Amino acid sequence: MINNNYILKPSIATHLKAQLLWVFVICCLSVSSLVAQNTPVTVSTTTARRGTFVSTKEYTGHLQPNAEVKIFANVSGKIVSFDAKVGQSVAKDAVLAQSNPREAALAVIRAESALSSAQSQLTTTEASAQARVESQLANAQETLMAAQAKLVETKSLAEMRIRNQLTQAETTYQAAIASIERSKTNAQQSLERAKTELDKNKLDYERTKSLHEKQHVSDSNLETAERSFKVSQTRYQEAVVTAEQFKEGATHPSVEKAKAELAVAQKIVESRGWEREIASAESDVNQAQANLHTAQKLVEAKSWEREIEIAKAAVKQATEQLKLAQEQLDDATIKSPIDGVIATQHLNVGDYAQLVSIPSAKPVFTVVAVDVLKAEWNIPAGDASRINNGDLVLISANSGIRNIVGTVSFISPTVNRDNNTVLVRATVPNSQNSLKPGTAITVSIKTGERKNVQLLPLRSVLNIQNGSGTIFVVEGNVARTKRVNVGGVHSGEIEVTSQLARGTSVIVADQHRLQDGTPVSIVRD
């Protein structure tokens, strides 16, 4: 006999199963959330180091040329041409301008040569222009046929070739990885052998040294043992350097290059690069058809007749140029007396150049020597004792060129009463002519240094304000915030004036992921 009190109806059983399933899902989600909250954040840490803090002081100034020469004409005469222009670099004895009858005579010869060339070109054009235009038509026909053949070939082979390139890139990438692994193994083995040899030679050296002190071995034996020990030290250091190249996380150019080439090949396949090649080949066919159409039009229009008219016009123009050259009677060859750059052009074509002995004479050019420049700036009189002739200074130009080393060459012995400053000059190398006279500069001078100060990477200190900032330190397995007092900043480091316990682990990156009490795991920076 069946007891109906213990039999659930189908609808009630289904509803109960659904409720149990929801309870199970909610429990799973709660457990997953709890696990996620307790997952440690991987962080990089460092410890404060003791070092020297260099302090500097900056001044503003400008650059001046090292030499400046005003160039006058050698003989009085009208300027007829220029062979250089403002901003151009010129060598010593380079020709800058012509204001001399001899140059006019040379100009006549050149004009006669140009006329002869134009007449020869006219004769050639009259004889061959038609044949050349018709040849262009034949070439256009051949180009179209070649483009059409290439299109057929591209449609047939482009996809296969690109996929083969991907396969080859994958093989090259795997081979590069394997090669690095072999090199890593060899480097580790070499390091172990070098360590064994170092330990052995060190022991031999110490034993020989002890015997030598007791006069049981000769000086030469001690020297031999010492030399072997030093050689093994060098080999071990070289092996350490080599092994360091293959430490975890190191990148290797051959692998990175192969990886990049593989990525490019994958992108080309993913983007169906052969379709672009086919489209390019189709474009070439269209261009070749357009060129053929143009060539056909030129033949139909007898375009060689237009070329002959242009050649006749060139002869006419050359004739006029010869007539003009014959009218130019003054000449002069004006040269640069130094290597430098043309700063100013004082006269123009047609101006009358005069000798420097004439009171009203104007120079033709001003040339400045810029391979070495002079930096000039003023410093407060109280700072003058901090700098001496021969001191090195760092100079940065407002144009963006940074940290040029200059040498102090002049410190004015007098003080400017208007502003209580002293003029200072420094020589600045400028072999590439990247610096320009007149450029505004900033000069940085070392003013002192503090030794054995506590330094942290600048990026490890957050929210710096009013001489203090926040750092994250690791206590146990969690991150803790800590307020510290800070000083100056130099070369990416910041001085921490609050005393940190020795060995305190300071987090240097990804602080945005942290809160006070966040669990962390450490990867040393």
Image: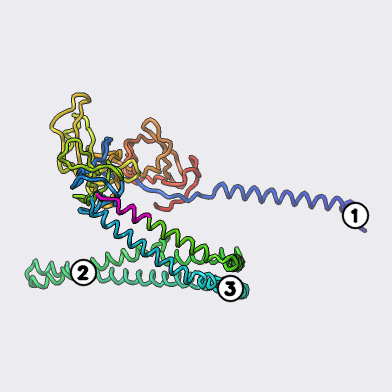
Q: Nearer the viewer, mark 2 or mark 3?
A: 3
- Give the residue type that dot 1 points to: Asn
Task: Answer whether labels 1 and 2 touch (C-beta < 8 Å).
Answer: no
User: x, y (%) of residue 493?
Assistant: 34, 43
- Is 323 within the magenta? yes
Question: Which mark identifies residue 311?
Answer: none
Q: Nearer the viewer, mark 1 or mark 2?
A: 2
Between 383 and 333, the one nearer to me in the picture: 333
Q: In the rendering, at what x and y percent does residue 496 appear?
A: 33, 38
Label ID, residue 3? 1
Residue 139: % across, % down = 54, 73
Name the residue type under label 2.
Answer: Val
Identify the secondary structure beneath mark 1.
loop
Q: Quadrant of the N terminus?
A: bottom right
Which residues, given as a range, are shown in magenta? 320-329
Label 3 sits on what residue type?
Answer: Gln
Helix, strand or loop at label 2? It is: helix
Residue 127 horizontal/vertical position (percent): 47, 71
For label 3, the residue is 141
Q: Where is residue 237, by image quadrant?
A: bottom left
Q: Could you classify mark 2 by the number of other residues whose Cα lies within 10 Å: few (under 14), some (14-19), or many (20 or more)?
A: some
The residue identified by callout 2 is 231
Q: Quadrant of residue 298?
A: bottom right
Cβ–Cβ under 8 Å for marks 3 and 1: no
